[in-house]
Amino acid sequence: MTGTTAPPAATAAPPWTTPLLRTRGLLISGTLAAVVYGVLANAYRTACPTQSAGVTTAQCEQFVMTPSPIVFFAMVVALLVGVGRAARRSEPRAVLRTLDRTGSVIIAIALGSAAIAQVWFWLLPLQPWVDHGGSLWFPFPFGAVSF
């Protein structure tokens, strides 16, 4: 008789393994969505007066768009609300569905905010503002513009 041992019996994974792995995936995708928003919500424009003679670079205005902290806060709130709702569910499929929807909401917040901020920033009529003054309106929560 040889000294062989029987392979260990396969054990079933605990019932909390799948929701825990899905929550980890939600945290990773949420972090990646925040990084993508942070990269995509940056822009830079320069506008100079239309006077043809005597315009110097000192008279030009520089506009810089950066990510808004409000969007990051909204993503964190969505994450906490989604995980809280998932924790109150009793059916495992409902837990997974809630976590999946939360991930979709966080990604939508990041991509939607970056898209709205970029479109609005590039559509701002800067030339009339530089030439004649006045005020500009920017969608405050989606990006922060300084000049």
Image: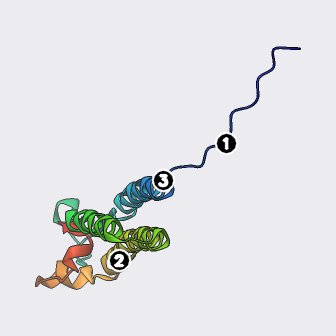
Q: Amino acid at mark 2?
A: Trp
Query: Where the C terminus falls, by quadrant?
Result: bottom left
Residue 6: image location, x then y, percent: 76, 29
- Residue 140 in view, yes or no: yes
Q: Which residue is mark 3?
A: 21
Residue 65 higher or lower than 31, as above or below: below
Q: Residue at x 37, y 79 (%)?
A: 119
Colour scheme of the picture: rainbow
Q: Which residue is mark 1?
A: 10
Instruction: Classify mark 2: helix, strand or loop.
Output: helix
Q: CA distance from mark 2 to mark 3?
A: 40 Å
Q: Is residue 109 left or right of residue 29?
A: left
Q: Are marks 1 and 3 in contact (CB under 8 Å)?
A: no
- The answer to which of 134 and 69 lies nearer the viewer is 69
Q: Is residue 23 left or right of residue 87?
A: right
- The answer to which of 125 and 16 lies nearer the viewer is 16
Q: Amino acid at mark 1?
A: Ala
- Residue 66 in view, yes or no: no
Q: CA distance from mark 1 to mark 2?
A: 59 Å
Residue 62 higher or lower than 32, as above or below: below
Q: Which residue is mark 2?
A: 122
Q: Earlier in the sequence, mark 1 or mark 3?
A: 1
